Amino acid sequence: MALVAMSFFTPSFSFAQASQPKAFTPKIKTPETSKELSSEEKSVSEDEVEEKSSHSASMNSGSPRRLQQHGLGLGLGQTFLFGNYGKHGNDKITLDFLYSYAASYSFDLLVDAHMSEHKDKKERTKVMGLTSSIKGRLVEYDNLSPYFLGGLGFYAPKVKRNVNGSTKWSDQKVTFGLNFGAGVDLRLNDHYVVGVMGQMHWPFKIQQDDQSDVKGYYMKLLITGMYLF
């Protein structure tokens, strides 16, 4: 009787075990930690390098210069006379008219026109010049650019001096001459530039018929301002 009862309940127990759902064990994929860390470090380092390079570029160069740009401006400062020019006139503050043209990122054309008369008691020295120079920029750091310049020009110096007991003007003639100098520009924006320039002018001597030749040189130390268009 007992065997019959056991044989009756055994299939039910087996069926219950078979019908009971199995526990779900999710499969967790373990990342390759070393590879992911190396890729993350690489991306961080690349971002840091890019940020540093962009910061350095913004520090070294502001807004880029525009080419084929014209400029008109003024230069105000002291004119120092040397040689025979200084014997007949005193140094004074003078005004120059300036024109510039941006030919490339490194070189500009600079044209200077000036005229001034310097007095020393009864004697006079009058200097006039129209010069053209090549302006070469050494470097541009955050809109600040030092430069050197040199070129040629036309000059018409004239002196009033004592000749045989009377003051007399020399014959005014046009001569060729050299100019060279250096300075620094600060570009405020795309249209305005201010700076400081020192320029030496060396006209060739002018021969005279009835008095000594006119010769000398002078230097200008100017505060400049330009409008670009």
Image (cartoon, rainbow, N blue to C red):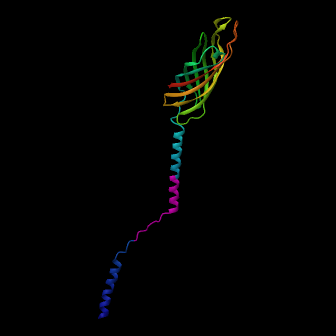
Name the residue at 57% across, 21% down.
78
Q: Can you say whether 166 is above or below 86 in the image?
A: above
The quadrant the N terminus occupies is: bottom left
Q: Position of residue 161 (x, y in %)?
A: 64, 9
Question: Looking at the image, can residue 52 be seen?
Answer: yes
- In this figure, what is the number of numbered marks? 0
Q: Nearer the viewer, residue 41 or 20?
A: 41
Q: Can you say whether 59 is above or below 165 in the image?
A: below
Residue 39 part of the magenta segment: yes
Q: Nearer the viewer, residue 28 or 168?
A: 168
Q: Residue furthest bottom?
A: 1
Residue 144 part of the magenta segment: no
Q: Position of residue 122 (x, y in %)?
A: 60, 9
Q: Can you say whether 154 is above or below 146 in the image?
A: above
Name the residue at 60% across, 33% down.
138
189 vs 106, left or right, is left
Q: Position of residue 123 (x, y in %)?
A: 61, 10
Location of residue 157 (image quadrant): top right
Q: Can you say whether 58 is above or below 9 in the image?
A: above
Question: Looking at the image, can residue 171 be seen?
Answer: no
Does the magenta stretch mainly form a helix, a strand or a loop?
A: helix
Q: Nearer the viewer, residue 118 or 180?
A: 118
Q: Position of residue 2 (x, y in %)?
A: 30, 93
* Magenta segment boundaries in residue numbering: 25-44
